[in-house]
Amino acid sequence: MTILPSQRLRRVHPLPAAGLLLLLLAGTASAEDFQLDNVRLDLGKFVLTIPKLDVKGTPLDRAGFQAIFQAGPGSNESPVARMSRLTAAEISAPSLVMEQSFGPQKQITTYRDIRFSEIREGKIARGEAKAGSIKVEGSTSGQMNGEILRTSFEGLDLPQIARVFADKAAPGTEPAMQTVFGRIEQDGYTLDLGELGKVSAGKAALRNFKARVGNEPMGELMTRIVTLGEESEKAAKDLNSKEDPAITEARDRQMLLAMLALFDSVDYGSGEIRDVVMAVKTPPKPGAKPEPVDLRFSRIAFGEDTPEKSGFVMEGLKFEGGGGKGSIASAGYFGFSLENTIKELRKALAEPDFDPSADDLRRFIPKLGTIRLSGIQITAPQQGKRGAAPLPPIEVGLGTFELKHGEQVNGIPTNMALTLDKLTIPVVESASNPSAKDLLAMGYRNLDLSAKLDLAWREASKEFAIRALSLGGVGMGKLEATGTLGNVGKEVFSTDLALAQVALLGATAKNLDIKLQNLGLAEKLIENEARKSKRKVEDVRREYGTIASLGLAALLGPSDGAKALAGAVARFVAKPGKLSVSATAKSPAGLGLADVITLAEPTEIFEKIDVKADTE
C-alpha cells in the first residue's frame, strides 16, 4: 500500500487504488504447471504487461488460462466472470507493469518479484511483491517518480475489484459494501514529486478495505475527477484567464459530486502509516515563489488503529516553513460520520437550482464526535519595524484541547464538553493591545490559561444544565460556575428558526452558582494601581474596599440578599481569597424574561431570587 502526500485525488491517484488494480489484473493466471511469455491485458485505461509468468497447480489448461486475459473473438464475457474462473496454487512473475490513464495523466507502476498463492475463483489468499517503482506522466506539476519497498497482502477479491471499476449499480439500488482485501502491508516508499517536493514513508498497514459498485464505474469516476482537477488547476494558473464564472461553478459542482460519489463507494477500514517525511512546496500566490515546508509524522492511523478505535489521528507531527516551526504530539477526531452529509450534499448538488443561502444548512451537519489536540508548541516570527532590531519569535503552547459532542437533534448537539488546558501565550505590547502594558507591569510575561465547559440538555425535565464552566490562569485566578435553565423544550432545536427563537425566549433561569478564587491577580492589580497613582498599596486597598461596600450596597438596594452579596464582595476585596455566590429563583418554574422586563427597578430582582454569598 502506497499513500501519496496531500496531492489531492484530482491530480494524482492514491497508490492504494493503483496497487489494487495492479493486483486485480496481476492475479489473472492459471493452468496445470506452465509458463507464459509477454502476457498483456488491455482494458483501455488499464493496461497490464507481464514479460514472463509462471503458473502452478491450476485446473485450467493453457488456452483456458489465456482466455482470462483476453476473451475470444465475439465473446461478451465480462471481466468479472473471467476473473471468477481464476484458480491456481501459485502464480509468480519476475516483474509486472501496469499503466493507468486518468484524463491527461498516466501512472506506470512496476512491481518486481511477484508471488501469489492459494487462488480460488478469483480470490487470492496471499500475495507479495519484493519491490516496485512508480512513475506519473502528464501532470501539470511535471513527472513524478518513486520507489516502493516490499508489499504483501491477504484476502484479495479480484472479481469485486472488477465489479467496482467496470460495473455500475442498477437504477434505484445501492449494493452493499464488500471486502476488497483483508490486509495490505508495505515496508515503505519514496516519491519524488518534481517541482512539488519529495515524500517518503516507513511501514504501513491497511485492513478490511471495502468498496461497492456505484452509480457509475469507479474507473470512469476517477478519470473525471483527474480531468476536472487538471482543468481547474490550469485555469487557476492562468493570470489572464477570462473564464465565465458559470463554467467555473459548473466544473466545481461536477468535481464535488464526483468526489462525494467516490467517498460514498469506499470504506477504508483500519490502518496506519509510520515515519512520514514530506519536503514539499506550497502553491504560490500569483507572482510569488513557492514556499518550502517540511513535515514529519511519526504515525498516522485511522479506524481500529486509533486510541479510540475509530476516526483518525496524527501523532508526532513536526513542521517548519515560512520562518516558523512547531510540533503537535497528537491530533485527531473520533466518533464522526459523514454518511448523512455526503447523502444530503449529493441530493442538493443534483438539483440545478440549488441555492445554499435559501436552504436549511443544518441538514448537512455530520454526526459529530470528539476533536482532540495535545502537546502543541509553535514558534512564529514577529514582523518588526523596518530598520529596527529584529524582534524575538513568539512561542505559543497548548497542553490539551478537547471538544466532545453528543446526542444531536436536527444536527445540533444537545451535549457538549470543552476542555482547554495549559494554553500558553506571550504578552506582547502593541498599539492594538493596550492591556498588555498593564500585564507586563504586573510581571505577566506569559499567560498560562485553562478553561472548561460542560453543557447538557435533559429532554424529560426540559432543562438545560451548565454542569461546569471554568476559566483560570496560573498565578492569576479561577472562575467557576454551574447553573440550570428551565422550560427548554425540543422546539429550541427546531429547523423553523422563528419557532426556535420563540421557544428560546420562553426559557427560565432556575439557579446559578459562582465561585471566584484569587491566585495572585488581585494583589497585582492593586499594586499596579498604586504604582500608577503613586499611592500606598494599603490606601488603594481601603479605597477599593469602601467602594465595594458602600457602592454595591447603594446599587443593589436594602434587601437581605443584596446586603449579603455586597458584604461578601467587600470582604473579598479587602482580603482576596475565595468568593462564593449562589442565586436560586423563588419560583419552581424559574425566572423568565417576562419577569425581568416587568421590573420597575433593577433592585426588585432580589424579591424574586434567594441569594447566598460568602468568602473564605
Image (cartoon, helix red, strand yellow):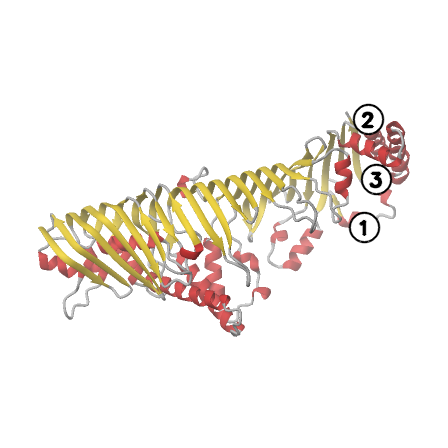
Relative image position of residue 100 (x, y in whole percent):
30, 61
Label 3, secondary structure: give it: helix
Which residue carries the number 1 mark?
A: 597
C-alpha separation, residue under disc 1 versus residue under disc 3: 14 Å
Relative image position of residue 180 (x, y in whole percent):
30, 51
* Quadrant in the rendering for residue 543: top right
Please report whichever mark, 2 or 1, sits nearer to the chain's N-terminal start. 2
| Residue for point 12% across, 55% down | 36
**In the visual, does 206 lie left or right of 81?**
right
Relative image position of residue 70 (x, y in whole percent):
17, 63
Which residue carries the number 3 mark?
A: 607
Mark in front: 2 vs 1: 2
**In the visual, does 119 lie left or right of 187?**
left
Res. 575 mark: 2
C-alpha separation, residue under disc 2 versus residue under disc 1: 36 Å
Q: Nearer the viewer, residue 105 or 77?
A: 105
Q: Nearer the viewer, residue 300 or 195?
A: 195
Label 2, secondary structure: give it: loop
| Image: 164 above or below 428 | below
* Quadrant in the rendering for residue 375: top right
Please report whichever mark, 3 or 2, sits nearer to the chain's N-terminal start. 2
Label 1, secondary structure: give it: helix
Mark in front: 3 vs 2: 2
| Residue for point 41% across, 50% down | 198
Which residue type does callout 2 highlight? Lys
C-alpha separation, residue under disc 3 versus residue under disc 2: 30 Å
Q: Is residue 85 visible?
A: no
Q: Residues within 10 Å of mark 3 (few under 14, many from 20)?
A: few
Relative image position of residue 249 (x, y in whole percent):
51, 69
